[in-house]
Image (cartoon, rainbow, N blue to C red):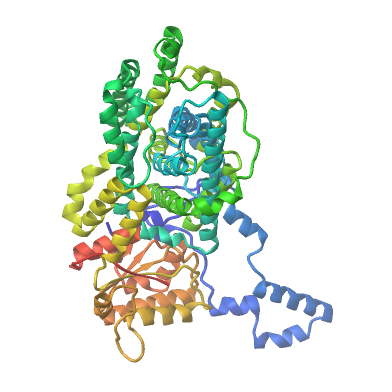
């Protein structure tokens, strides 16, 4: 749990990734006083300058002023916003290209049936799931920092979008729509889904502009896992009418899950035997294949593509047996070739969909940032949470112009990409090639695909989310508070709805606070210009001012405010740079916390900052056990090892 975090190292794709300690990395040289005088000059250098020719002296003074006052310049900003400019020159073509190609093709093959299946979950035609499996993947490849992240359609977002689409564009009560009326209804629903993608993308870009990447911490791991597990149950129940061949209207709003179950049980005698047979055979193939891929992932060169095999078999069976005409089985039909023309979503709809776009933006960022952090920790590189906001915001915003619905990173395809040997974002390009081939040439082969098979793909893809419930016994032993957050969030998601359940989970987790535990985030560079502000802010929150130890200032309830701070977790994820003066402030803070009986824990220090802190003498004040990969690990350590009891956690954002 503790110790020097391997994830804090920052090896690029062209560097060795087996660095044992971040202390072994090359760090930026501290800006010492002597170096400062060498760069910017001082009074002692004036006689030398006066001896120079006038033109030479003016030119030197101008260069000095430019170095001292100018910003970072366009090239560093461009490299920050386009990560391939940083890692692509160091790409190890011989070592990584084959793995990226195999992983990308494997994920692309899964994207095709899964994208069409999640489109039905979104209440739009299947081809729009293919668009959402192409444009967002391409954009994230250019803008994202998660080397192992796979983006595209995600069941939870599709479910949330579908519920909003059904509410905004309901199907007429009389039913039995003509072909033209059905096309008009589908066009309106596609427009509503694209508007929600536009709205969520705009919100994430606004969060990026305000540097609110630290908000991911509010969506803790228990909240995210409970949210996805509860949403998986919603997906299962919502697909029952398609599995049974029952033309039932989709239930939306609070208690929709129970309304759907009641409607299915009432209409069960009218179910279609043919649809039920196709569904049973599909699940009989898909579920064992999923299990084989999990159990033998280390022995299989690539996972078995059970979804695409099922799609091909079902399409051939339906075509040869004429199931669509003889037994009235619903099929996908013609997939339009090519791409839709760019179209700006109806901005007049934005006020109506903002309430739905906000929870989608939070879910997108929470799931994507969590997945990116997990694999960044595993493979020893770092991600930029604010750049992730930018990447997913631009991805949703631009893809909405091509009639895509909200998208994010996906659990199943990310795990598949890693298991198949993916190394970098280049795998996303190969995935796009597979989807592109379907959009341009292979679409007619899916004409006879039964929609019941897509419903089965939806259900089988929820396997990983359902199995998250197996972690509950261990969570009970580690933290009763996290267990309570998990259960409250899950019950709220299941009984109410996904978006309301998310709100309940976040509020409940924020209300449960640990007296004595304070989490502080300082999301700016720490150098000689900001060290005074850093010192004053932490003194105020921790009660370390010159007037003696006072009650700390927190955002919690009155009983938590009165409790003295016993443990402080300093979230360093936003500290992208520290010079010698800033590092000395952290070392002095460690000394003052030790003298005041406060345990100082540092989380998410990047390699450069950690190196500067180490050179300033940090390890003389703290032990390696006080350095953590994530804020969650540090908080768990405080609860378990430092005997803090009670609810979790008193958080202050600086």
Locate residue 515: give its quadrant.
Answer: bottom left
Residue 33 left/right relative to 480:
right
Say which of 152 and 458 sits in front. Answer: 458
State the residue lying farthest toward the top: 320
Locate residue 188: give its quadrant.
Answer: top right
Percent position (x, y) of residue 205? Answer: 54, 56
Say which of 108 and 331 sits in front. Answer: 331
Vertically, is 534 above or below 160? below
Residue 227 left/right relative to 311:
left
The residue at the point 48 percent across, 74 percent down is: 580
The residue at the point 70 percent across, 75 percent down is: 64
Residue 84 left/right relative to 633:
right
Count the numbered circles shown: 0
Locate residue 462: give its quadrant.
Answer: top left
Say which of 21 and 360 sits in front. Answer: 360
Quadrant in which the C terminus is drawn: bottom left
State the residue lying farthest toward the front: 174
Percent position (x, y) of residue 171? Answer: 47, 35
Vertically, is 537 above or below 295? below
Vertically, is 621 above or below 347? below
The residue at the point 38 percent across, 41 percent down is: 411
Vertically, is 166 above or below 384? above
Percent position (x, y) of residue 336? Answer: 59, 25
Residue 387 visible in the shown view: no
Quadrant in which the N terminus is drawn: bottom left
Say which of 436 and 31 sits in front. Answer: 436
């Amino acid at each position: 749990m503790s110790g020097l975090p391997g994830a804090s190292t920052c090896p690029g794709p062209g560097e060795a990734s087996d660095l044992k300690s971040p202390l072994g990395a090359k760090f930026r040289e501290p800006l010492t006083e002597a170096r400062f005088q060498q760069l910017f000059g001082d009074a002692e250098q004036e006689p030398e300058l006066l001896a120079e020719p006038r033109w030479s002296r003016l030119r030197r003074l101008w260069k000095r002023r430019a170095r001292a006052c100018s910003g970072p310049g366009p090239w560093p900003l461009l490299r920050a916003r386009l990560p391939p400019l940083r890692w692509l020159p160091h790409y190890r073509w011989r070592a990584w290209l084959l793995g990226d190609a195999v992983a990308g093709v494997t994920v692309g093959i899964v994207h095709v049936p899964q994208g069409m299946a999640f489109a039905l979950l979104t209440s739009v035609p299947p081809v729009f799931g293919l668009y959402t499996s192409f444009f967002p993947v391409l954009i994230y490849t250019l803008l994202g920092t998660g080397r192992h992240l796979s983006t595209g359609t995600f069941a939870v977002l599709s479910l949330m979008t579908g519920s909003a689409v059904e509410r905004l564009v309901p199907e007429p009560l009389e039913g039995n729509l003509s072909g033209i009326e059905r096309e008009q209804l589908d066009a309106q629903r596609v427009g509503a889904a694209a508007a929600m993608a536009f709205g969520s993308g705009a919100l994430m870009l606004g969060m990026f502009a305000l540097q609110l990447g630290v908000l991911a911490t509010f969506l803790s791991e228990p909240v995210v896992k409970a949210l996805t597990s509860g949403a998986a149950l919603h997906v299962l129940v919502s697909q029952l009418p398609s599995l049974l061949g029952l033309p039932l209207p989709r239930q939306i709003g609070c208690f929709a899950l129970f309304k759907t179950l009641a409607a299915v049980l009432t209409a069960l005698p009218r179910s279609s035997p043919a649809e039920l047979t196709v569904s049973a055979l599909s699940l009989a193939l898909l579920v064992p294949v999923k299990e084989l891929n999990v159990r033998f992932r280390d022995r299989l060169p690539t996972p078995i593509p059970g979804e695409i095999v099922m799609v091909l078999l079902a399409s051939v069976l339906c075509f040869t047996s004429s199931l669509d005409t003889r037994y009235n089985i619903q099929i996908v039909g013609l997939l339009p070739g090519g791409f839709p023309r760019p179209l700006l979503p109806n901005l007049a709809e934005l006020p109506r969909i903002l309430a739905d776009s906000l929870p989608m933006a939070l879910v997108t960022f929470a799931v994507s940032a969590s997945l990116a952090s997990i694999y960044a920790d595993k493979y020893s590189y770092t991600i930029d949470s604010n750049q992730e906001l930018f990447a997913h915001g631009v991805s949703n915003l631009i893809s909405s112009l091509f009639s895509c619905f909200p998208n994010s990173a996906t659990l199943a395809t990310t795990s598949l990409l890693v298991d198949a040997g993916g190394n970098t974002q280049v795998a996303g390009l190969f995935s796009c090639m597979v989807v592109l081939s379907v959009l341009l040439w292979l679409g007619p082969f899916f004409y006879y695909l039964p929609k019941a098979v897509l419903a089965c793909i939806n259900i089988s893809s929820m396997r990983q989310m359902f199995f998250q419930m197996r972690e509950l016994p261990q969570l009970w032993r580690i933290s009763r508070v996290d267990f309570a957050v998990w259960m409250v969030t899950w019950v709220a998601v299941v009984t109410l709805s996904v978006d309301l359940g998310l709100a309940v989970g976040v509020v409940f987790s924020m209300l449960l606070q640990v007296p004595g535990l304070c989490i502080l985030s300082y999301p700016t560079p720490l150098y000689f210009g900001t060290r005074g502000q850093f010192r004053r802010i932490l003194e105020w929150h921790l009660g370390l001012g010159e007037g003696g130890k006072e009650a700390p200032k927190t955002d919690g309830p009155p009983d938590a405010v009165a409790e003295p701070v016993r443990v402080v977790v300093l979230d360093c994820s936003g500290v992208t740079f520290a010079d010698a003066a800033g590092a000395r402030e952290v070392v002095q803070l460690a000394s003052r916390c030790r003298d005041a009986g406060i345990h100082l824990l540092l989380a998410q220090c990047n390699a450069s900052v950690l190196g500067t802190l180490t050179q300033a003498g940090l390890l003389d004040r703290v032990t390696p056990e006080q350095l953590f990969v994530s804020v969650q690990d540090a908080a768990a350590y405080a609860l378990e090892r430092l005997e803090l009891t009670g609810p979790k956690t008193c958080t202050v954002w600086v």
